[in-house]
Image: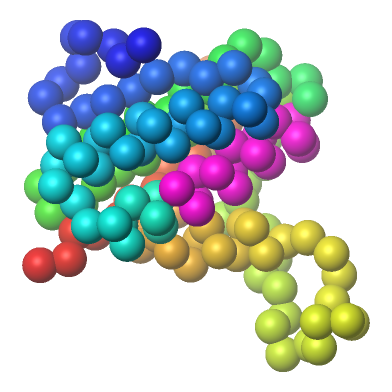
Amino acid sequence: MVNAILPEGEMARRFPRDLSSVREIFALIDDFTSAHNLLPAFKESVRLAVDEVFANMVRHNPSGSGDILVSLSHEGKRVVIRMVDKGGIPYDLTTHPLPDLSVPLENRKVGGLGVYFSRTVMDEVHYEHTDNAGIVTFVKNLET
């Protein structure tokens, strides 16, 4: 359920640590982008980045505790997306090595493209670990 006491222009919800939650996360993103009249391409970029990071939080942070919070806020000429994962091991996706795309596909190491795409489709990506929570913040500038 969306928190009723959020500032105007913000939507947030907690999702169970399960990959099946992605459908509900997409519904939140769809509601947000509709409420703010954002273009379909914008919505797809946000879906891609959030889907990848949520899946990584579920798959690679088994000691995480409780639900994962996803919030979206419209702040001037940008949208800020925050994902908060309580507990577990800190992992800064902003320092994750980028794949070498010049290597032929058959010679590439498996994995790493999701983080690459998440970082590529967003204008800013930030990570912090505070109060036993990993917080990923995406910023997507609104095109004029």
Residue 86 colored magenta? no
Residue 1 placement (x, y as % from top left):
36, 11
What's the magenta region? 47-61
The residue under the point 86% across, 70% down is 109
Is 42 rendered above or below residue 90?
below
Q: Is residue 52 left or right of residue 104?
A: left
Residue 62 placement (x, y as % from top left):
79, 25
Residue 141: quarter of image: bottom left
Residue farthest toward the right in the current orientation of the protein: 107
Determine the main secondary structure of the stretch shown in magenta: helix
The residue under the point 55% across, 44% down is 51
In the foreground, 48 or 120: 48
The residue under the point 52% across, 19% down is 15
The scheme the figure's colours follow is rainbow
Residue 26 placement (x, y as % from top left):
44, 37
Is 81 rendered above or below residue 121?
above
Mark yes or no: residue 29 visible. Answer: yes
In the foreground, 86 or 101: 101
